[in-house]
Image (cartoon, rainbow, N blue to C red):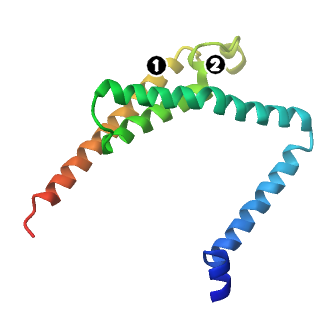
Amino acid sequence: MRRLRRWYGASPLHLLLLLASLTVTLYAGVRLLDGDTVGVLVWFVGAALLHDLVFLPLYAGADRLGGAALRSPPGRWVNHVRVPVFLAGLLLLVWYPLILRRVPHFTRNTALPDDVFLGRWLLVTAALFAASALALLLRARWSNLFRSAPR
């Protein structure tokens, strides 16, 4: 056991979970590539290239511009802005056809209204920022509470 831990660097349970995860991933990959293999591979490579060549420079540049605009060193507060921006952007990316009303005949096909998604996305985004601001406030209050306590 000691030799395995020294050779592998972690516990045998970690190795077992890693092998199980790789097995599930391999099974999912085989099932996914069973149909349109070329289409799936083109989509996967295209998504990776789009992320690495377009999205990563965009959000890294936006992060630097945001830090430069605030003219302060990034402290612990910066993740309280990054997380809601990321989650709101992810929701927009997934649901943009409905948010921007780009789905023709949505109401006719589903009997659901198509004019509520923008407002709901804005409400969810506002709630994400409000929860993040509350978490930052509580975090600052908590750290001040323990910093000023006598030892």
Q: Residue at x 79, y 62 (%)?
A: 23
Looking at the picture, does residue 29 appear above or below residue 71? below
Relative side of 129 to 28, left or right? left
* Residue type, numbered disc 1: Gly
139 and 58: which is toward the camera: 58
Count of numbered tags: 2
Quarter placement of the N terminus = bottom right
- Secondary structure under badge 2? helix
Q: Are the residues flagged by discs 1 and 2 in contact, CB closer than 8 Å?
A: no
For marks 1 and 2, the one nearer the N-term is: 2
Q: Residue at x 68, y 16 (%)?
A: 106
- Secondary structure under badge 1? helix
Read off the residue under disc 2. 97
Quarter-wise, where is residue 43 in the image? top right
Read off the residue under disc 1. 119
25 and 99: which is toward the camera: 25
Q: Which mark is residue 132?
A: none
Quarter placement of the C terminus = bottom left
Quarter-wise, where is residue 84 in the image? top left
